């Protein structure tokens, strides 16, 4: 996964605190590392309440989660409700992990992989976007303190689906610049940390990557967690979760209220070979999601095992 400073911790679906049901001595679900009573549970404490599914309702919610947590270098244009002709680019990562940038070209860039975590990433993005749109001069927009009360990104943008472009590296950082002096070291460092990644074309928010020792498919899915776990358990027991020979469904990431199933793939698989199997899996998943029958004992055991193979990304 794309390198970042956010803490990752193993958890199960049963132990994950639900929004509004966090014990005062439990870790705060915002990922700060503090107990809830000393962070977002403190009377009059944090500036924004924790939002379990902050990107819900945005165009291509699953792709936004993937770009924020899993994809090294990707961009997608955003359409502003109040100014649809203005160019706004949503990026996985900007130089220096900047929240936003006003560019010399007149474009406005918004970054997903950032250093701050103020409880509601959507509100943070909206604040950074508004600051960049209002900037008098080109430059970086920084966020060192929680934003004041204001809109969330859902209030500012519109559209049904994002047109996501996955890049081989971060040369898009300089694509609109005439003078790239001083960017060489930053580009080299960023490119060195990026793993080859591709987005599948036939299904939503499924990303192949090669981490050197093996390949993975990481697929962010929109279904509610309990329903998705049940469906994945049915497919696992039926042997219908194998995408290509010698591939293996190994677990899931949990991020921003969504699950992202992960498969290990043999080296040399590549993204193109996954298109047909992924489409077939999506159809099989839709079929079992509609199955309301009780789980068998083997399926219940599989579901319990899958719930224990989750990594929560904060």
Image (cartoon, rainbow, N blue to C red):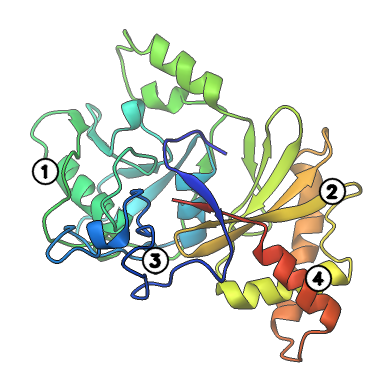
Q: Is residue 89 left or right of residue 300?
A: left
Sequence order check: which comes first, mark 2 or mark 1? 1
- Disc 2 to disc 1, C-alpha distance: 49 Å
Residue assigned mark 1: 134
The numbered dot on residue 106 is none
- Check whether the beta carbons of the residues at disc 3 and disc 1 lie within 8 A of each other: no
- Check whether the beta carbons of the residues at disc 2 and disc 4 lie within 8 A of each other: no
Instruction: Choose mark 1 or mark 4, whichever is in front.
Output: 4
Q: Nearer the viewer, residue 107 or 143?
A: 143
- Disc 2 to disc 3, C-alpha distance: 31 Å
Question: Quick one: SS at disc 3?
Answer: loop
Residue 157 placed where, x, y %? 29, 60
Sequence order check: which comes first, mark 2 or mark 3? 3
Residue assigned mark 2: 247
Q: Is residue 266 left or right of residue 97?
A: right
Question: Quick one: SS at disc 4?
Answer: helix
Instruction: Choose mark 2 or mark 3, whichever is in front.
Output: 3
Sequence order check: which comes first, mark 3 or mark 1? 3
Residue assigned mark 3: 52
Instruction: Choose mark 3 or mark 1, whichever is in front.
Output: 3
Tell me the crowding category of disc 1: few under 14, some 14 to 19, or many 20 or more residues within 10 angstroms, Cα based.
few
Q: Is residue 286 left or right of residue 119?
A: right
Sequence order check: which comes first, mark 3 or mark 4? 3
Residue assigned mark 4: 235
Tell me the crowding category of disc 4: few under 14, some 14 to 19, or many 20 or more residues within 10 angstroms, Cα based.
many
Q: Quadrant of the N terminus?
A: top right
């Amino acid at each position: 996964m794309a390198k970042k400073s956010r803490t990752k911790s193993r958890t199960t679906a049963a132990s994950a605190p639900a929004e509004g049901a966090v014990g005062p001595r439990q870790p705060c679900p915002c990922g700060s590392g503090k107990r809830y009573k000393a962070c977002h549970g403190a009377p009059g404490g944090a500036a924004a309440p924790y939002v379990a599914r902050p990107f819900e309702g945005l165009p291509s919610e699953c792709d936004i989660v993937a770009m924020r947590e899993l994809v090294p270098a990707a961009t997608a244009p955003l359409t502003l409700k109040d100014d649809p002709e203005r160019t706004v680019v949503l990026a996985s990562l900007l130089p220096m992990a900047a929240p936003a940038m006003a560019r010399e070209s007149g474009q406005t860039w918004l970054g997903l992989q950032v250093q701050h975590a103020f409880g509601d990433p959507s509100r943070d993005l909206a604040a950074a976007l508004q600051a960049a749109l209002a900037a008098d001069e080109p430059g970086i927009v920084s966020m060192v303190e929680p934003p004041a009360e204001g809109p969330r990104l859902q209030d500012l943008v519109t559209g049904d689906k994002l047109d996501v472009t996955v890049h081989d590296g971060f040369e898009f950082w300089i694509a609109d610049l005439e003078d790239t002096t001083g960017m060489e070291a930053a580009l080299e460092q960023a490119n060195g940390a990026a793993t080859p990644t591709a987005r599948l074309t036939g299904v939503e928010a499924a990303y192949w990557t090669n981490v050197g020792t093996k390949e993975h498919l990481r697929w962010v899915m929109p279904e509610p967690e309990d329903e998705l776990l049940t469906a994945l358990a049915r497919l696992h027991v039926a042997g219908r979760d194998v995408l290509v020979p010698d591939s293996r469904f190994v677990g899931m990431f949990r991020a921003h209220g969504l699950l992202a199933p992960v498969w290990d793939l043999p080296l040399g698989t590549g993204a193109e070979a996954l298109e047909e199997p992924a489409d077939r899996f999506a159809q099989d998943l839709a079929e079992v999601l509609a199955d309301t029958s009780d789980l068998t004992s083997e399926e219940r055991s599989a579901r319990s095992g899958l719930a224990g193979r989750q990594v929560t990304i904060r």
